[in-house]
Image (spheres, rainbow, N blue to C red):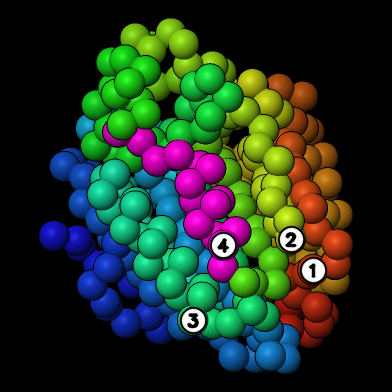
């Protein structure tokens, strides 16, 4: 059973997917109603936010829960309808991605769809895998069978007509399964499908820091920069890269892949952004 929890005071409890909690993993899903004043014309904004921290069979992570909650709050303030979830099993993850894809499809082709994931991620033979909290892995085959392939998430979204797709992966931490020696460091870079931008918390094959504060260096930088008005998204990622590089003394350099042909800003109006900061 999922434990549903509202991340924002205006959110109503619903039965759905993805969760983060202490002890045995449970799924917490928090649909968040968008802020109507932040919507820009007929454009629709929908986001899926996932944080996996309390792993049952892998090293636990300190910050994905906080990262996911703060990201959900930010996106809500930017006019997104948000489904936020933490500590998800493999079945939870697969189901929530399917439900989110249906939501994007229902909103129509003028929808901006965003997926944010914080947690363990592993590359194997050039494929990236997002690791659920219940994954028990001691071999490459088990990694493939007990994780969620990033390419499957991307392919599902690519089949749905939408204005733009934004994917942010704060998941390039060290390999949590030392017995799988074939797993590479960090994540492999995947070319963004048409009309998409994919942001990685560090360069290909490198490892990202979980952070010693309340957020990872990457998510903290994104939240800092994205709140500013009139910052085109590709410029936003460049400034995030600069801030993370400075914060980590050059140890971590974010990366992104983009096929966008139009500009996009989270806040296009100075007054709106100032009121929601």
Image spot of residue 104 (x, y percent): 52, 73
- State yes or no: residue 152 in magenta: yes
Q: Image quarter for residue 56? A: top left
The CA distance from mark 3 to mark 2 is 19 Å
Q: Which residues are magenta?
A: 146-160
Question: Residue placed at 53% from the left, 20% from the top?
Answer: 125
Reading the image, the residue beneath label 3 is 106
C-alpha gap between disc 1 and disc 3: 22 Å
Residue 159's tag is 4
Task: Looking at the image, tell me whether mark 2 or mark 4 is earlier in sequence order.
Answer: 4
Q: Residue furthest front?
A: 159
Q: Is residue 140 above or below residue 94?
A: above
Please tell me which residue is depicted at 46% across the width and 11% down the height of the picture. Answer: 182
Residue 124, numbered label: none
Q: Secondary structure at mark 2?
A: loop
Q: Earlier in the sequence, mark 1 or mark 4?
A: 4
* CA distance for labels 2 and 4: 12 Å
Q: Which is more foreground, mark 1 or mark 3?
A: 3
Dot 1: element = loop
Which secondary structure type mostly characterizes the magenta part of the structure? helix
Question: Do residues under tags 1 and 2 come within 8 Å of each other at their CB atoms?
Answer: no
- Tell me: residue 215, above or below residue 125: below
| Cα–Cα gap, marks 1 and 2 | 11 Å
Q: Which mark is on residue 195?
A: 2
Give the crowd class for mark 3: few <14, some 14-19, many >=20 residues within 10 Å.
few
Residue at position x 43%, y 72% in the image: 102
Q: Earlier in the sequence, mark 3 or mark 4?
A: 3
Q: Secondary structure at mark 4?
A: loop
Q: Tell which tag, 2 or 4, sits nearer the viewer.
A: 4
Residue 264, numbered circle:
1
Q: Quadrant of residue 114?
A: bottom right
């Amino acid at each position: 059973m999922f434990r549903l929890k509202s991340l924002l005071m205006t959110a109503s409890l619903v039965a759905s997917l993805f969760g983060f909690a202490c002890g045995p993993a449970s799924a917490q899903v928090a649909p968040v109603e968008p802020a109507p004043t932040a919507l820009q014309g007929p454009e629709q904004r929908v986001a899926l936010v996932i944080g996996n921290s309390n792993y049952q069979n892998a090293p636990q992570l300190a910050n994905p829960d906080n990262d996911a909650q703060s990201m959900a709050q930010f996106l809500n303030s930017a006019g997104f309808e948000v489904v936020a979830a933490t500590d998800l099993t493999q079945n939870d993850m697969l189901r929530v991605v399917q439900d989110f894809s249906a939501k994007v499809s229902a909103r129509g082709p003028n929808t901006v769809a965003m997926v944010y994931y914080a947690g363990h991620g592993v590359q194997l033979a050039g494929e990236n895998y997002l690791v659920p909290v219940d994954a028990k892995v001691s071999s490459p085959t088990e990694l493939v069978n007990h994780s969620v392939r990033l390419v499957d998430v991307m392919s599902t979204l690519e089949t749905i007509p939408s204005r733009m797709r934004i994917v942010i992966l704060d998941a390039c931490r060290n390999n949590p399964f030392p017995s799988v020696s074939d797993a590479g460091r960090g994540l492999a870079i995947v070319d963004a499908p048409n009309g998409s931008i994919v942001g990685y918390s560090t360069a290909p094959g490198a490892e990202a820091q979980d952070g010693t504060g309340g957020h990872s260096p990457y998510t903290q930088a994104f939240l800092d920069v994205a709140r500013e008005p009139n910052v085109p998204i590709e410029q936003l990622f460049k400034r995030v890269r600069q801030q993370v590089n400075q914060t980590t003394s050059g140890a971590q350099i974010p990366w992104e892949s983009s096929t966008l042909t139009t500009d996009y800003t989270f806040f296009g109006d100075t007054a709106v952004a100032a009121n929601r900061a």
